[in-house]
Amino acid sequence: MPGLRHQDVQDRSLIEHLPGSPAGKPLFHRPPNSGGRFRVSAPLEWSPVDAGAAQPVLAIDLGGTQIRAAHVAPDLTVSLRRAIPTNGVEGPDAVIGRICSIAAEVRAQANREGLPEPSGIGISSPGPLDPWRGVVVLPPNLPGWVDIPLADRVENQLGMPTFLERDTNVAMMAEWRYGSARNADDAIYITVSTGIGGGIIARGEPLQGPDNTAGEVGHMTIDIDGPLCGDGMQGHAEAIGSGTAIARDGRLLLENGESPILAQLVAGGRDVDAALVAEAAEAGDDACRAIYERAYVAVGVLCASLVNALNPQVIVIGGSIAEHHPVLREVARREIDSRAFRGPARRVRVTSPRFTDDVSLIGSLPIVNERMNDPAYRRASNAGGSSPITANVAAGLPSDAGSKTVERVGGQTQLEEPR
C-alpha cells in the first residue's frame, strides 16, 4: 500500500486475515493451497490442571543467600513459612541437607496442624538447570554446584515426588496462572533486582527451549559498546539496568570524585549498593540520578525489543528495583511506545506483579500439579551422568549437542543427527 510505513503494517486492523483464522489468533495448521508457506504445528500437549483439582504442595525457594519453604494450598494460601541461610560456601551436600531439613519441618508442622498432605515438592532454583532431569547444572552463586541431581536427592530423602524449575520460570508461572498475566496467551515476566531475569509464555505455553535457557532476557544485548556483564559478555541489559550495575556505576562515581553526596553517605561506613545510590539520588545527587535514569531506559529498551520479537499481550515487571522504584515501569512504557512497532506497542500492557516475596513459592503450585503425571518430568529417577549442557561444554561441543549421537573418530568429534 503506497505511503504505508512498516510500523503501520504491524497494526492488526490493517492485516487481512486468512480464511479460518479469527482476528488476532494464530493459524496453527496449514491452510488449503498455502503453497507450503505455513509451518504445520503439532497440537499443544501441555494441559493445565483445573484449580479445583489442584493439590497442595511443599514449595522450596533456593537462593544464593537463603532457603525458604512453605505449604502452598490450591487457594494460594501460603502457610508455615520457614527460612534459613543458604551458606552456599559449605558446598552442595550441606545445602541439600538444609533443604531437606527445612522441608521436613514444614511437612511435619502441616501434619500437626491438620493441613492437607502436600502432593509433591516444587523447588525454585537459580539456573542454568535441567528441569526434565531435575539437575542443577552450574549456578554462578552456588559454589561447587556442577550437575547436582537436586530433585532426585530431595525426593529420595523425603519420599515425595520432586520437581525442579528455574526461579524466573517459577515466578512467571505464578503470575501467569494466578496473577497479573492471567488469561494471557503471550506474556513476559521480567525481574529487575540484583540481576535481570525473566520467563516467557508463548501461544499459551511456557517457553523453555532445548537447554531451558529461554527467558534469560537479562542477557540480551542492548548496547554493543556497553559494559561487561557478569557472564563476561558486553552490553547486556543486566550490565546496565540491574542492581549490580547500579552499584558498580556508583562506585565509579566515587573513584572519580563525581558524587559528593554519595561520598558523604559512604563516609559513615556504608557500602555502595543500589539502595545507597538511590538514597544519594533522592538527596539531590544528579550523577546518581543519571545512573538510575540510564538503568530505567536500559530495561525499557529491553522491553521494546521483546515487544517486537515476541508480540506479548502483557509484560509484568517485578523484582526489588521495580518494587522500590515504580517509575521504572513508566519509563519502560515510554520506551516501548517510542521504539517498538506501533501495533504491538499499543497492544501490550506493562504492569506490576500481583505477588512479591511469595512469587517463587506460589509458582510451584501449578508446576507440581501439572508435572505430576507428565513422564517428561519423571526422567530424573532414571537418568544418570552429567547434564548434556555441561557435558557438551566440557567436550568442546555446542550446548545443544545433547540431542545428537557423539562419536570420536581419529581424534575428531563427529555429531550424528538423531534418526
Image (cartoon, grey):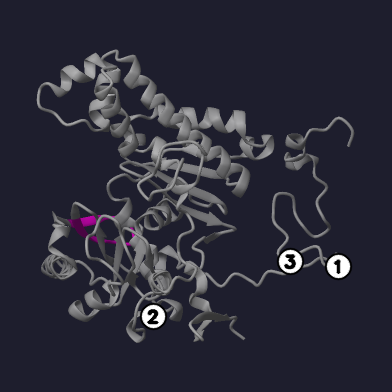
Give left or right: position of 256 versus 343: left
How crowded is the residue under tag 1: few (<14 C-alpha within 10 Å), some, or many (20+)?
few
How crowded is the residue under tag 3: few (<14 C-alpha within 10 Å), some, or many (20+)?
few
Magenta stretch: includes residue 395: no
Q: Are marks 2 and 3 in contact (CB under 8 Å)?
A: no
User: 399 or 96, which lies in front?
Assistant: 399
Amino acid found under the numbered disc labelled 3: Arg
Residue at image mark 2: 378
Magenta stretch: includes residue 78: yes
Residue at image mark 1: 32
Image quadrant in which you'd find residue 141: bottom left
As helix, strand or loop, the secondary structure at mark 2 comes to loop
Residue at image mark 3: 39
Give left or right: position of 10 versus 249: right
Which mark sits nearer the N-terminus, 2 or 3?
3
- Mark-to-mark CA distance, 2 and 3: 30 Å
